[in-house]
Amino acid sequence: MERLQTQGLHHVTLVGADRQTSIDFWEGVLGMPFVFEQPNLDNPNESHIYFDPGDGRLITVFSNEERKALNRRTPTEPGCVHHIAFNVSRANFNEALKRLKARGIENTGLRDRQIFDAVYFQDPLGLLIELSCWKFDAPAGFTRSDVLHEAHLLRVARGDRAILESHLADAIEQLVQRSTRSLSADRSPKNPYIRG
C-alpha cells in the first residue's frame, strides 16, 4: 500500500456569513489582501472569496448574503477546527495587544508557548484566531520543523514535559555542528578568557 505525499498547505476554506463581514475581518483587521473572488462552483447561492495571509497561500471563505454573523464560539467537537494560527513578526506581535484593545476585540493577552508567543481572539463568527510569533529562526539549510524535531528528541531524553528555549538552542547548535565542517579537531565548548 502506498501513501499520498503532501507538499504544503494549499488553502483553508471557511464557511462565512455575508461577504462584507469576511472582507472587514480578514483584510480590515488582519491585513490580508482580498485577492480573488468567484462564485462557489458547488453552490450558486454563495460567493468564494480569497485572502492572502502573507505567504502566498490562501484563506478562502464561502459567503452568502442571507447568512448573518453569529458571535458565538464555533463548535469544538471531534472533527471540528479548534483554531487557526497565523505567523506574525515580533514587531507586529508586540503591537497586537494594543491594536486589538483599540478595536475593542477581547483577547487572551500574551500566552507563552515556550517555542512561540501567542495571543488568541475570536473572529466575528466565533472562530478562534491565534497570532503567533516564533522564538527562534532555523539555521540556514534547515526548517523550523527540523529544529522542533531535534528539540523534541532532546526534551524526551531529558524527561521534560514540553520543549523549552534551552532545547531549541541546543537543537540549533546540534544541527549546525552536524551539517557544517570545521578544521578544528575539538569542537567542544571552550573558555578563551581563562588560560592555564
Image (cartoon, rainbow, N blue to C red):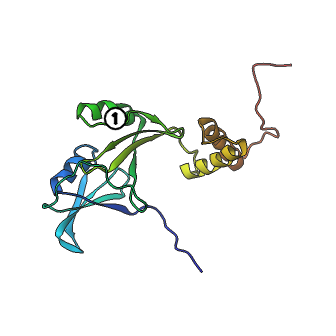
Name the amino acid, label 1.
Ala
Residue extending farthest to the front is 77
- Residue at horizontal 77%, vertical 42%? 183
Residue extending farthest to the bottom is 1
Q: Is residue 151 left or right of residue 84?
A: right
Rendering quarter of residue 138: top right
Image quarter (top left, top right, bottom left or bottom right) of the C terminus: top right
Residue extending farthest to the left is 66
- Residue at horizontal 36%, vertical 36%? 92
| Residue identifier under label 1 | 96
- Residue at horizontal 28%, vertical 49%? 126
Q: Is residue 10 left or right of residue 72?
A: right
* Classed neighbour count for the residue bearing mark 1: other residues with Cα under 10 Å, few (<14), some (14–19), many (≥20): some
Query: Could you say where residue 56 lies in the image, as x and y percent from the top left?
Result: 36, 56
Q: Is residue 5 above or below residue 105?
A: below
Between 160 and 180, the one nearer to me in the picture: 160
Between 181 and 107, the one nearer to me in the picture: 107
Q: Is residue 67 left or right of residue 181?
A: left
- Residue at horizontal 48%, vertical 65%? 7
Query: Could you say where residue 166 lies in the image, as x and y percent from the top left?
Result: 63, 35
